[in-house]
Amino acid sequence: MYCLGSVGLILLVLTVQNGYGVPDSAVWNKEETSERNYYTRYHNMTEISEWMEQMKRENPDVVSSLVYGQTYEKRNITLMKIGLNSTVRKKAIWMDCGIHAREWIAPAFCQYFVEKILQTYKHDTKMNEMMKNLDFYVTPVLNVDGYIFSWLNESTRLWRKNRSPGTEKCTCFGTDLNRNFYANWGMVGVSTDCCAQTYCGTKAISEPEAQAVTDMLVKMSGDILAFLTIHSYSQLILVPYGHPNISAPNYDELMEVGLGAAKAIKDVHGMDYTVGTSPDVLYPNSGSSRDFARLIGIPLSFTFELRDKGEHGFLLPEDQIQPTCEEAYAGAHHIISYAHDKAFYSSAATITAKLWATLLAACITTATLGRM
């Protein structure tokens, strides 16, 4: 039997602080959610799940949760629904993070985003208005199995896919969930080799995680104004579609809104984000959730690729979490505000115009009849 000496103890403490070799059941102090530095660190799945419960306890009137599917390993896929109660059916904003396990900054942003809107809606007029008119559906970690696996040790830290097994002739694990949606599935930017990082699965929505999102989006498609899926890295805002020969019918609008979001991001810390379709600014791909959302009629659909541009890549240091989240929040806020104002102010203006047109027509008819 071996005993830990002081050096071994120091190494163990450093390993835990770095987040490597940490079991998902790591001990966590709940009080830390109220500390500012909570949102400057990465958190494992147990911590994120407990944080979600705490957000509900602290904000019972505006936060609830919904389990809308299960992963291959039978873990719950849970979203947070955030919004003020209403007697009428509300419009929605969808945001998911962590579809790729190794992109830890994405779940960190979802946590920051939720905390930020809960902090601001009580005193910020615009956010309060949007909380009245919209419900935010936020999935902090979509690829739960893969995310947990990426926390096991250094050898699994860069795991990307989910954890479903390969076909009979393949001993590798995992499907790239962002190649598994029913949107030009299997056409470009994918692999049929189940050991590849971009393995698209045996068929569209073969994976339970992709199926869960598909079911929710189809059910809610008439209410969702904007779809945001958060990734890293490259500092990009991607618009549909990933196939180089297919364009979204509202491509010009998507680019205008995306460029506005990029400007909002740059105004925070001076970081440049490039806007465009994936084939134009990154690489062609198919089967993405972003493309599926646009394909079923959700008008504003974007992929955010957060910091950085490759210096650290997926291993973004924790001291960059806060500035990354601050700027990404500004970009997301721009898109959400645009979607909200278009739905509520434009429709109100249209109704008013139609009402005035009806009244004017009635007046003209009355005046005409009066002269007869």
Image (cartoon, rainbow, N blue to C red):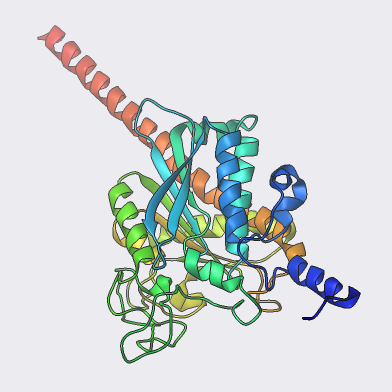
In the displayed structure image, the side of residue 197 where residue 219 appears, left or right? left
Q: Residue at x 35, y 72 (%)?
A: 180
Provide residue 21's location: percent of width, then percent of height.
68, 73
Image height of 249 relative to 80, above or below: below
The total number of labels drawn is: 0
* Along the line of sight, the residue nearer the viewer: 57 or 233: 57
* Along the line of sight, the residue nearer the viewer: 16 or 261: 16
* Along the line of sight, the residue nearer the viewer: 323 or 257: 323
Provide residue 311's location: percent of width, then percent of height.
71, 79
Which image quadrant is residue 176 in?
bottom left
In the displayed structure image, the side of residue 224 where residue 121 appears, left or right? right
Image height of 329 relative to 154, above or below: above
Residue at the extreme front of the image, as rendered: 1
Image height of 92 relative to 277, above or below: above
Instruction: Report whether residue 109 is seen.
Output: no
Instruction: Report whether residue 106 is seen.
Output: yes
Q: Residue at x 63, y 33 (%)?
A: 124
Which image quadrant is residue 169 in?
bottom left
In the displayed structure image, the side of residue 176 where residue 221 appears, left or right? left
Residue at the extreme top of the image, as rendered: 370
Q: Quadrant of the N terminus?
A: bottom right
Provide residue 236's location: percent of width, then percent of height.
56, 68
Residue at the extreme bottom of the image, as rendered: 169
